[in-house]
Amino acid sequence: MSKSRSSAVFGKRKEPHTFIIARGEEIRHFTVRPWMSAVAGSVLAACAVGYLLATSYLVLRDDLIGATVARQARLQHAYEDRISALRAQVDRITSRQMLDQQLVESKVAELIDRQEELTARNGMILPLLEKAVGEDALPVRGPVPLTKPEIRAGIPLENAFAPTATASAAASALSGLAQKKPRADEPNMSPADRADLLFMKINRSLRDIEDQQLRKIRSVKENAYKTADAIVTALKEAGLPVDPGYGTSDVGGPLVPVGTEDPFEAEVEELDDALTKLDGIRRAAVRLPIANPAPGQNVTSGFGVRRDPLIGRPAFHAGIDFRAAVGVQVRASGAGTVVKSGWNGGYGRMVEIDHGNGLTTRYAHLSRIKVAEGEAISAGAIIGLAGSSGRSTGPHLHYEVRRNGKATNPVRYISAGKAIKDLL
């Protein structure tokens, strides 16, 4: 019996809650469903949670805003510190670049000064070379290098004496080097150090050019003195008049301690003096009768006593005879002035030239005369043609050299001329 009662209770349906509201005669009732209770509870819970969150936000808002502001302030300070550090770095780099630029400009200015000095030196030397008419006869030619050598640093200085081109090349090279990255073998060198190294190489090359100029000037000067000495010695040995004071004249001048004067200017002055003396000796030598009047012709009769070809008795021969066919050109043995031109007794057609210092030459037995009296003649000029006029046994040239009217042996003078031919 108890079992059946229990089953009836378990199977009974649960009824929903009902609310009854009585107001006077009006009676209302509301049935509350389970889902409605759940919804109402959820809404109340959501409102409670929202209220709690809003209250927490209002309480913690100031702390959150303060933390955000502090974070932004820290970020701003870090950014400003970074900007300051970068600005300081830029200032350092700019200052270093300005110093490097000033260094490069000063080096280039110094190179320009050196280049202008070399150009001025070249201007001093070139007139001396023009003055040395017989420059090609000197053993050393071209006392000044007219082209610059290649500099190992990589700058070809295109013209040793073109300051604009050289300064421009140097400026470009130094400026480029200042911006160039260091090489593997120069890891710790700054651009300024590399520019200074290049400047030292260029400067060393310019000093080499200056030293080479001095060496060449000294070489040409010594050769000029040696050439003049050789000419004077040969002329003196032949008994020809030369400057009696050459090499023996008195010398003097103020005492100038060594090292106080410019060595280049001193060398140039000495070179000028040497070339002046050499030029004077050469001018005097070309007036002397030392050239062969009949080049390539053999001497058939010498100077002095010989058997006369016409009478067969001993007689004095005042000159030398050259074998020369009719029409062979006869040349003046030295510069001078024609004092006789025409027929002269046994000489036949004859030309006589006055060379100064009491020296005269005669060219006899000519078939034709090509100069007139009073005419100035240069050494080697054609004065006539060989022949057999006058007292002659056949075509030849009779040549005499007279000193103060007295006949002398022409062979001595011709030999001296051969000895110094390459020096004139």
Image (tube, rainbow, N blue to C red):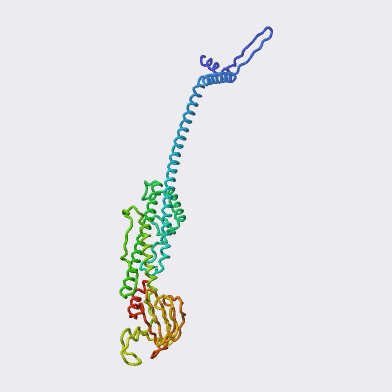
Q: Is residue 121 visible?
A: yes
Residue 353 coordinates in the image, percent (x, y): 41, 78
Picture quadrant where residue 418 is located: bottom left
The C terminus: image quadrant: bottom left
Residue 214 coordinates in the image, percent (x, y): 36, 59
- Position of residue 132 relative to residue 346, above or below, is above
Residue 284 coordinates in the image, percent (x, y): 38, 71
Q: Is residue 227 visible?
A: no
Nearest the eye: 204 or 196: 204
Q: For the point 31% across and 62% down, which residue is it?
A: 250
Picture quadrant where residue 352 is located: bottom left
Residue 328 coordinates in the image, percent (x, y): 42, 84
Nearest the eye: 138 or 244: 244
| Residue most extreme to the bottom | 311
Marker count (numbered): 0
Nearest the eye: 320 or 78: 320
Q: For the point 38% across and 70% down, which residue is it?
A: 282
Q: Give the left or right position of residue 172, taking residue 22 as reference.
A: left
Nearest the eye: 75 or 2: 75
| Residue most extreme to the front | 405
| Residue most extreme to the right | 25
